[in-house]
Amino acid sequence: MKKLLFSLLFFTALAASSQNIKVYPSNWWVGMKNPTLQLLIHSQADITDSIAINYPGVIANKILLLENKHYATIDITITPDAKPGILQIQFIKKKKVNNRVSFELFAKNNDNGKTRVRGVRSEDLVYLIMPDRFSNGDTTNDIIKSMRDGVCDRGNMYARHGGDLKGIESHLDYFTELGVTSLWLTPVIENDMPLTDEGGTKRSTYHGYAFTDHYNIDKRFGGNKAYKELVDAMHSKGLKIIQDAVYNHVGASHWSAIDPPMHDWFNQWPTYTQTSYKDQPMLDPYASAFDKKLSNKGWFTRFMPDLNQENPVVSNFLIQHAIWCTELFGIDGWRVDTYFYSNPEFLNRINNALLTEFPSLTVFGEAWVQTVTNSAYFCENNIDVPFKHNLQGVTDFPLYFAMLDGVNQSFGWAEGVNKLYATLVQDILYKDPYRNAIFLDNHDLDRIYSVVGEDDNKLKTAITWLLTLRGIPQLYYGTEILMKNFKNPSDAKVREDFPGGWKTDTVNKFTAAGRTEKENDIFNYIKKLAYYRKSSSALTTGKLMQFVPADGVYVYFRYDDKQTVAVLSNTNKQAASIDATRFEERLAGFESARNIITGEEIHSMLFSVPANTTWVLELQ
């Protein structure tokens, strides 16, 4: 029996219709490290036929009809003897094949870990894009008549604007010019949702966080074909791709919400119950069971049903989808949305499954928390706690808050750059803080240029910290051209269109000629620092040593056995005299320093840094 090359397994249950039968995942691969797979069959009618699989090297172990008679699962094993090809899932009635569904097996890609699925590291610079708002490369997909939301209106900040994957692909040289190495796109998976009513305002789900079919890229972005072409084009230019994952919920128009496979597919409450949005109960040693349940199982919004990841069919579905996307498209990294709202055991399981198949892959989770302790708890850490998360890194919100305070607050015992210094002191809690994603803003936050009061020097200081501190730096689209705004009256104000991304735009900020002098100054500042960082072993992987801030001046060093870089930030409103002999333990053996932005050489141990200015010096 061990040498069995095929399996023929019949299941006599409820009835199978010959119409609209879907299989999830939509295809798979031979040669995967985990040979087992759970197929989810969804029929519009009750399944009453027998189901059979007959394919060399594929063993059907178990077929189970789910609570909803429209669904069945088939557990299969794809043995090492299996070859790429098309197998048939047969529905048999009265000993005759009544219907069949094709399921294709491909060969696993041999370039994984080499040219694709490479992982995103501290050596990278990530550029975050909201596809609908960046560039419209194909106007024919602006409106898809078969989809529920048929509005594309750039004059309405709550509607779709028509940005797509072809638009992003047409600007790959722009990212390379800026010094970007990786793109993170907010979700591209199908969001076939009607307009939602939020506070009396009709809004589209252009943001992408309300999935309706995991196995389709949204047609308004160009569909699966356009996504594959974009990722392949990126990889050919050495760029990496980060996909945005959502495990916690789906959109209310998802097929599983319209026709739930089981009563506990979603987390159930007697009446609609929203999450508390609080992470604290998940790690609080004194937390009540009710508060933990509310944090973890409460719904994010009314139109985003909360998935029950304790249901093994749900968890298998989500895990297999993540593996499917990674293998099919060649995803280099995953950013996981609403991380702490998901079931902790499930999160460890999916992380382990992804990294078992793709050891080079990077996964970091959105943990929107206030303290370093809370942040470190949700990833690999050095904390003695009963439950240990296995996530590689998080979106580092405590460092984000500290960098904003560092540029905006006046210097004090615990304010200004002392806040930044004290936050980094707590890196002892992380197993590897270099795997955290660090940022100044994103699609959910006020834009950094507005936060610093449109002060170019403060912006340059913040950008310098972003590109010289430890971690994986993430730049939000448009920061380099001084896009601004607060989240007032809504998030849409910080998600405006990139000027020049539409043919009808009167200005094109993708070109130097289309940018103002101030915009080019910031663009070139980021570009110069980003390109220097690419070739700097000290800034990408080197150690960090910081000195206690004094009189509004904060100094830290990045260094390894090849290079030492000093970063000096004067956050005062007047010039600061610096006596570099204080930093002698890092300066020993060096005779001079070069300002990597201006090219100026410094030969004295006594010098003055202008007001509200940060220098980056390479020691020589």
Image: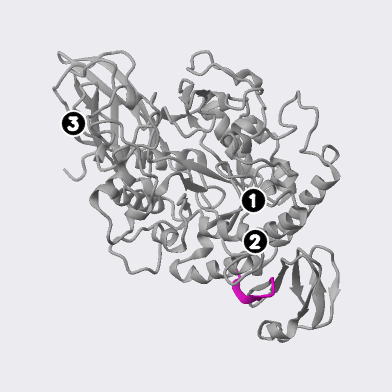
CA separation, marks 3 and 1? 46 Å
- Give the quadrant of residue 606: bottom right
| Precedes in sequence: disc 3 or disc 1 | 3
Q: Where is residue 416 in the image (x, y as percent from the top left)?
A: 63, 65
Residue 536, percent across and down?
Answer: 69, 66
Q: Earlier in the sequence, mark 2 or mark 1?
A: 1
- Point out the stretch of residues depicted in magenta: 542-552
Q: Would you name the residue on which mark 3 appears?
A: 64
- Amino acid type, mark 3: Leu
The residue drawn where x is 62% and y is 57% is 404
Q: In this view, does 171 lie above or below 148?
A: below
Question: Quick check: 543 left or right of 279?
Answer: right
Real-space CA distance between mark 2 and mark 3, rounded to the nearest whole angstrom? 61 Å
**Magenta-span inclusion, residue 598:** no
Residue underneath mark 2:
409
Q: Which of 521 and 484 is in front in this view?
A: 484
Dot 1 corresponds to which residue? 181
Pointer 2 or 3: first along the chain: 3
Q: Is mark 2 on a helix, strand or loop?
A: loop
- In the displayed structure, 78 sits above or below 117; it is above
Q: How many labels does the image show?
A: 3
Query: Is residue 56 visible in the rendered structure shown here?
Result: no
Q: Are marks 2 and 3 in contact (CB under 8 Å)?
A: no
